[in-house]
Structures are given as C-alpha cells and as structure tokens.
C-alpha cells in the first residue's frame, strides 16, 4: 500500500499561511489534465493561474483529491474543479513565496531494484 501524497496537506498549509499573512494565494493549474473543470475559454489553455483566496472564491474545498470552488469569470459565477495532480504550484502573488509540487508519473514503469548476483 502506498502512502498518501503530501501535496494536498502542503497546499492547505501554504493556503492557510498566505491567508493569515494577508497574501493572495494562487495556484498554477495544468489544464491538459482531463478532469480539470473550468469555463471553456480558460480550460482550452495549457496552464491557467487561479486566485484561490477566500475573498475570490466561495464554497472553497481544499480536499485530498481535488480543489473545488465557485468563482466569477467575466462577471459570471462558475464551478471550478481541479484534481490535486493538476496543480503545479501554489504561491503568494505579492511576494512569490510558495512551492512547486512534484507529481510522480503514474504511467512510468517502476524499475526493479532487485538484482541477481552471481
């Protein structure tokens, strides 16, 4: 059994620190992930930067599998759904402090670490 990814925990920790410090948390999303749900003009880009500050979202959920919220795009409210695997980084727009996330390539075959020794 594999251990859970630390990424959602780190995302929540950085988000909370940014909110407490009065900074504006943004996530960089890889829109090529097929489960990302954004308004059409935004989801057609390879990457998009989203403001996930409490003042810019409603019903924000920073879950272990996804980030989900409502936000306004061009004056209209939209539901946003972003799987954790699609989030490349979180950082404060004011000072650039944050972190990039490492997502293991699940399609990559694990190499055998055992060797036959003569």
Image: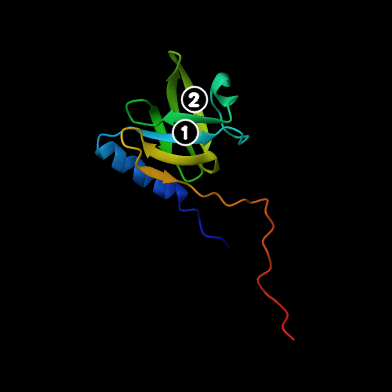
Q: Is residue 19 above or below residue 7?
A: above
From the viewer's perspective, is 38 left or right of 70? right
Depth check: 4 or 29 in front?
29
The CA span between labels 1 and 2 is 8 Å
Displayed quadrant of residue 112: bottom right
- Secondary element under disc 1, as helix, strand or loop, is strand
Residue 87 place in picture, x, y as percent: 50, 40
Image x and y of residue 66, in percent: 50, 40
> Badge 1 is on which residue?
68
**Most distant residue in the bottom direction:** 118
The answer to whether 114 appears left or right of 74 in the picture is right
Q: Which residue is identified by label 2?
A: 79
Q: How many marks?
A: 2
Q: Position of residue 88 (x, y in %)?
A: 50, 41
Q: Quadrant of residue 45?
A: top right
Can you tell which mark lies on residue 46?
none
Q: Earlier in the sequence, mark 1 or mark 2?
A: 1
- Residue 108, percent from left and from top: 67, 54
Q: Residue furthest front?
A: 95
Most foreground residue, 65 or 24: 24
Q: Report the residue at 44% width, 35% height from top.
A: 27
Query: Farthest top residue?
Result: 75
């Amino acid at each position: 059994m594999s251990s859970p990814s630390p990424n959602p925990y780190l995302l929540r920790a950085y988000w909370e620190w940014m909110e407490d410090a009065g900074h504006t948390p943004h996530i960089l999303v890889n829109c090529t992930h097929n489960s990302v749900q954004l308004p059409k003009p935004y989801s057609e880009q390879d990457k998009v930067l989203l403001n996930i500050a409490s003042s810019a979202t409603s019903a924000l959920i920073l879950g272990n599998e996804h980030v989900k919220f409502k936000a306004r795009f061009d004056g209209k409210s939209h539901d946003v759904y972003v799987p954790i695997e699609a989030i490349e980084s979180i950082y404060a727009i004011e000072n650039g402090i944050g972190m990039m996330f490492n997502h293991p390539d699940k399609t990559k075959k694990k190499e055998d670490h055992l060797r036959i020794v003569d």
